[in-house]
Structures are given as structure tokens and as C-alpha cells.
Amino acid sequence: MILTIRNEYGSAYVDTQGAQWVSFKDAQGLEHLWQGDAAYWSGQAPVLFPIVGALRNGRAHIKDGEYEMKQHGIARHLAFEVTEQKEDSVTLTLRSTEETKKQYPYDFALHMTYRFEGPRMVTEFKVENTGDEVMPFALGGHPAFNCPMVEGETFEDYVVEFEKPETARCPAIEGALINFNHRTTVLEYETTIPMRHELFHTDALIFDTPRSRVVRLKSLKTGHGVEMDFDDFCYLGVWSAKNDAPFVALEPWAGCATGTDEDDEFLHKRALTLLKPGKAATFAFGVKAL
């Protein structure tokens, strides 16, 4: 089921399957969100939970045994329940079941809220530990944006721009794992990365120590684009498909794929949140059209 939220600044559609947003338009009706194309990538803005990226060989040791989990976790493959809906906001909830415990053996509730706050469309993750033991998890967003957004532009007209100068040495992605000991300099006290498809021929750019809390994808030709704030997240991924796809994803992560220097014990993964029984943790990022 597709749900609509809107205010005077724009509108968004949210799918109950996976609780991902599938449209983000400004007040003039210009579509900013990638609309999915299997020739490049059929996703749009999947919810990443309880892992970001991949586990080694798709499995990890959790509690008392080995568990298999696909890339980016279980939430994006499951239907959510609509638990609250207003004109400018909607909340969808996923609760653990016996089926989810076959991949992730914890009791949880994941509430995804999408709401407009003026021109910002906020994506909020609220994770509840409904069990009786400490629950480790990672989560993240994965919205992809049209690049270019309007006719007459090209991919190369766009830049990714950080709010502060960054010295970024991005770790390499080897297979599905991250090698934090092999890095490539992407920025040298600079703010701007000109977009070119070759940047993504070896997968995403991962910024694991960004100073900035705001990033933009924008056209230098027309000014069209998006601005994302991601205060609650320690990593930012910037990605496009390897086959010269006409989109760029801006991905705020609280956690990341397994590192080549890590073993397969889930609790040993970088940047996990360890949530106590009966407690909740909230993470949010905002996007607005430029």
C-alpha cells in the first residue's frame, strides 16, 4: 500500500512494503527521488536494519548460533503496519516474529516515521528493545536521488558538497566487506566532489570520519538538488550503481558492513548500538529540495 504525506513545500509517497519512501516531490511537482529501474537498481530508499551492508558470506555468529542475513538486513523485505497517519506524517511499525528471529534472534519493534517539518522531510527510526537482553543493531538510510533531475542536465553537472572542508580517505570495499586499512584520498581539505561515473565503478565512497553534518547533491547548472542533514549518524555513504546509473544515493549509517579485519562475531562489528531491555533509541535525518 502506498501512503501520501504532504505540506505546502512538497509531497512524499511511502510504501508499507519495506517502509521505504518511493517519491519525493517539491512544491512544483519535480520528482527528486530515483524511481527504480532494474536495468540499474530497482531500489529507491530501502530501510537498513538490523545491519548496514553485508556480513561475511552473509552470516554471523549471534548469541548461541550462526544466522544468515541478506545485505542491509531484514526490514526492507517485510511489510510494515501503519500505526499513525496524518496529512503531513506517517508512522509504520515492524515487530519481531518467529520468522524474523530465524535471521535476527531478538525481540524488537522498529517504528519508521516520515514527516514534513517545513521544507524538510524527516526520516526517523525508533528502535525498541522489547526483549529481556541487550540487543545489538545497526541501521541506516539509503535514499537515491535522480542525477540528473531535469532535462538538459548531465550526471557531470552535479556535485556532492559538504558543509565543511573535509579531508577524506575513504576505505576500500573488497567484495562485500570494507577494508579500513586500504584507503583512497577523495578530498584534501575540500568541500566538493564533482560527480563522474568512474567514482563508483568500485562501489560506494564511505566517509567514516566526516566533520560535516550536512551534505548536498546539486546541479551547478540549474541549482536543482537535495540537502541532507544527518546529525545522528556516524558514517555517510555516497553511491551510484557501477553501470553508469543516473542517480546518486546519500546514505547515513549508524553501523557499517563487516570489516576485513573483523571476525564473524556479530557483537564485534563496528559502531553497533547496544540497546538495553525496555529501552528505545531514535535516529533521524532530514532531506529538503533545493
Image (tube, rainbow, N blue to C red):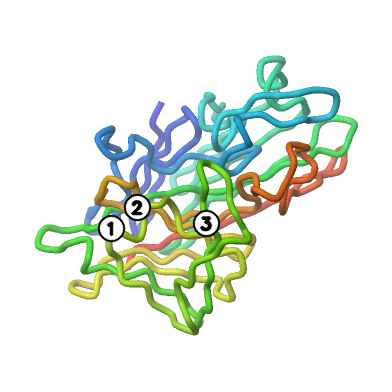
Mark 2 packing: few (<14 Cα in 10 Å), some, or many (20+)? some
Q: Which residue is mark 2?
A: 201
Query: Are dots 1 and 2 in contact, CB under 8 Å?
Result: yes
What is the C-alpha distance between the residues marked 1 and 2?
7 Å
Identity of the amino acid at label 3? Answer: Ala
Identity of the amino acid at label 1? Answer: His
Nearer-N-terminus badge (1/3) = 3
Q: Which residue is mark 3?
A: 172
Residue at left offset 80%, top offset 42%:
267
Identity of the amino acid at label 2? Answer: His
Q: Is 23 on the left-hand or right-hand side of 104?
A: left
Residue 193, given in percent of the width and then of the height, sits at 37, 72
Q: Which residue is mark 1?
A: 197
Residue 68, given in percent of the width and then of the height, sits at 65, 24
Residue at left offset 36%, top offset 55%:
200
Nearer-N-terminus badge (2/3) = 3
Please tell me whether mark 3 sits on a helix, a strand or a loop.
Answer: strand
Placement of the C terminus among the 4 image quadrants = bottom left
Snapshot quadrant of residue 153 = bottom left
Mark 3 packing: few (<14 Cα in 10 Å), some, or many (20+)? some
Residue at left offset 27%, top offset 68%:
158
